[in-house]
Image: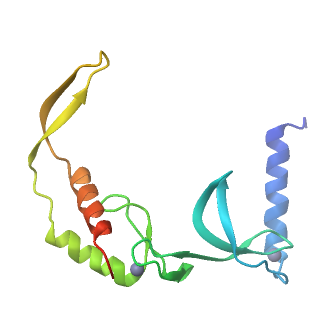
Amino acid sequence: MVETYESLREEFDRKVEALRKRCTHPKVSDWAVEWWALAHSTGHEVKACEICGAVVNRRTRCSKCGRLLEEKEFVKGDGKTRALEVFCQACEDKWMEFAKRHPYVPRVVEMTVHATDGSVSTKKETLSEGMHYMEVYEEFMKERGK
Ligand SMILES: [Zn+2]
Ligand SMILES: [Zn+2]
């Protein structure tokens, strides 16, 4: 079999997976910021096994109240009525209530259109449900306090 980048990577993945399966994670790092790319934090802190590199613990702060949450307490947004940020259960409940008080009613809004030739015009469009909840969510996040 010819070795390729792809085959090497598959072999690597397989070996790491096997290592992680038998590892008992005897040495675990301190909390460290997790990165998904250079200079782009995931917003989470993780504890990783120093032998196999597996993440054994994850925590982050509630996007609304700032309380530190363990992974099992995370309540993620559905990406539809609110962003995929992590809330604590209390803030999630408040958000659900807030959203209920601002239900989606189709309404016509004036949109500004920037054409490629530089001209600006307006057109009337029905506000989509997604846009509506984005606005409601923004308002909710601006509300001060608990
Ligand atoms: Zn391990
Ligand atoms: Zn919260």
Asked if residue 114 is positioned above or below residue 32 in the image, the reply reads: above
Q: Position of residue 105 (x, y in %)?
A: 10, 56
Residue 32 occupies quadrant: bottom right
User: In the image, is residue 28 above or below residue 10?
Assistant: below
Quarter that holds the N terminus:
top right
Instruction: Please give the name of the residue rendered at 46% of the width and 77% of the height, measured from the top-left corner.
Output: 66
Q: Nearer the viewer, residue 29 or 106?
A: 29
Q: Residue furthest front?
A: 144
Residue plotted at (29% across, 63% down): 137
**Residue 58: x, y in percent?**
62, 76
Relative placement, left or right, of 58 versus 96 is right
Q: Is residue 37 left or right of residue 81?
A: right
| Number of numbered callouts drawn | 0
In the image, what residue occupies the spot 29% across and 61% down? 138
Q: Could you say where residue 144 lies in the image, as x and y percent from the top left? A: 30, 75
Relative horizontal placement of residue 124, taking residue 19 as reference (left or right): left
Quarter of the figure with the C terminus:
bottom left
Residue 39 vertical placement versus 143 (above, below):
above
Residue 136: quarter of image:
bottom left
Q: Where 85 sits versus 1, above or below?
A: below
Looking at the image, which is closer to me, 32 or 28? Answer: 32
**Which image quarter has ligand 1?**
bottom right
Q: Is residue 37 left or right of residue 139?
A: right
The extreme top residue here reads 117
Quarter where residue 14 is shown? bottom right
Q: Residue at x 24, y 50 (%)?
A: 131
**What colour scheme has been applied to the protein in the rendered image?**
rainbow
- Across and down, in percent, residue 134 comes to 28, 56
